[in-house]
Image (tube, rainbow, N blue to C red):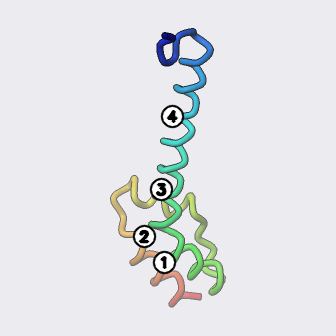
């Protein structure tokens, strides 16, 4: 009876699939968190990109406040 993931090729494939799934979940989480703000920014011409929104979170800045302020300034 063969064991699951017996050789190195199968193990590597399983690890690669797992890594892609984890990356996909992270991208989906970021997308769902910032999508509404990004759409507001793009439709009003505020000029704030998705990476800018992500950077604001890393800098401990509330992206919602910045986007709304920039929209009012435009």
- Provide the residue designation for mark 4: 18
* Secondary element at image label 4: helix
Tell which circle, 4 or 3, labels the residue nearer the N-terminal end: 4
* Residue at (54, 48) in percent of width and height: 24
Task: Give the numbered dot on residue 13.
Answer: none
Q: Where is residue 65? Give x, y as percent.
A: 39, 78
Q: CA distance from mark 1 to mark 4?
A: 35 Å
Per the image, label 2 sits on a secondary structure element best described as: helix
Pointer 2 residue? 63
**Is 8 placed above or below 53 here?**
above
Residue tagged 1: 67
* Real-space CA distance between mark 2 and mark 3, rounded to the nearest whole angstrom: 9 Å
Q: Earlier in the sequence, mark 2 or mark 3?
A: 3
Q: In whole angstroms, how far apart are the C-alphas of marks 1 and 2?
A: 6 Å
The image shows residue 52, relative to residue 19, as above or below, that is: below
CA gap, disc 2 to disc 4? Answer: 31 Å
Q: Marks 2 and 4: CB-CB under 8 Å?
A: no
Q: Residue at x 48, y 18 (%)?
A: 4
> In the rendering, at what x and y percent does residue 14 appear?
54, 26
Asked whether 24 or 2 is in front, the reply is 2
Pinpoint residue 52: horizontal percent, then vertical percent: 54, 61
Residue designated by label 3: 55
Q: Earlier in the sequence, mark 1 or mark 4?
A: 4
Name the N-terminal-most of marks 2 and 4. 4
Q: Quadrant of the C terminus?
A: bottom right
Mark 1 falls on what kind of element?
helix
Mark 4 surroundings within 10 Å by alpha-carbon count, few (fewer than 14), some (14 through 19), many (20 or more)? few
Q: Secondary structure at mark 3?
A: helix
């Amino acid at each position: 009876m063969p064991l699951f993931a017996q050789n190195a090729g199968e193990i590597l494939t399983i690890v690669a699939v797992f890594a892609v799934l984890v990356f996909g979940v992270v991208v989906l989480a970021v997308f769902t968190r910032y999508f509404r703000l990004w759409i507001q920014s793009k439709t009003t011409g505020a000029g704030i990109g998705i990476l800018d929104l992500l950077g604001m979170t890393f800098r401990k800045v509330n992206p919602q406040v910045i986007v709304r302020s920039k929209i009012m300034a435009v």
